Image (cartoon, rainbow, N blue to C red):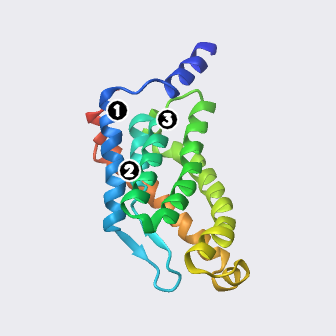
Amino acid sequence: MYYSLMDTRLYMFKQFTVREISVAAGLSALSIITQLIHIGYQSPQWGMWVDIVAVSWFIAYFLFGLQLSLLVSLVGAVMITIFAPETWLGAGMKWIASVPILFSFGLMAFMMRKTFHQYRNILFLSVPLLCGILVRCLLVVPLNYYVAIPLWTGMTTALAIKTIPWFIIVLFNVVQGLLDVTLAWIIVYKFKLNRFIKK
């Protein structure tokens, strides 16, 4: 059991290979492209987006695990702010909202003394995904009211709370979280993207 636990820790904090870094760079670039093109749906009433910017971040997790997915997400968010400066707030909020789900996957794998490869079985996704989405919602609701909406629209926090109901923010984030993970899982395991990655 001790060996298994140490093996999991070493796997999570291993050094990246050239191939992994190359794929990570490609996935980071993909998130930037999807932001610049902004593929998705924007609510005409609330102005909130459901998009595919973070899908590549979760693809990175299913291919390589937590450490590389965090790198891909961070590089993607930073580069979005460089190439599209007007979206720095959105990129930051996207990163903050996505990280709890990534950490939830990593924590569950660590607690079960497994690697991220266990998520080939979609049933293993349910508990960490629900936990991650719950933490995501607990973070983004106050952050939207006290930071994002006031900075983006000029509304006061009190006006933002009256104008945009909390359950709308929760709904968009639940849909976004489910979309990110589901699309990434389908691309990696159903379309067999993982066959190109040496285990």
Secondary structure at badge 1 equals: helix
Q: Determine whether label 2 and label 1 are within 8 Å by CB.
A: no
Placement of 56 over or under 42, stated as above or below: above
Q: Position of residue 87 (x, y in %)?
A: 45, 66
Image quadrant in which the C terminus is located: top left
Secondary structure at badge 2 equals: helix
In the rendered structure, the answer to whether residue 159 lies left or right of residue 183 reads right
**Disc marking residue 67:** 3
The residue at which mark 2 appears reads as 56
Q: Earlier in the sequence, mark 2 or mark 1?
A: 1
The residue at which mark 1 appears reads as 20
Q: Nearer the viewer, residue 158 or 151?
A: 151
Image quadrant in which the N terminus is located: top right
Q: Is residue 126 visible to the viewer in this orientation of the structure?
A: no
Q: Amino acid at mark 3?
A: Gln
Please tell me which residue is depicted at 58% across the width and 13% down the height of the picture.
3
Q: Position of residue 119 (x, y in %)?
A: 47, 40
- Residue reaching furthest to the left: 196
The Cα–Cα distance between marks 1 and 3, rounded to whole angstroms, is: 11 Å
Please tell me which residue is depicted at 32% across the width and 53% down the height of the picture.
30
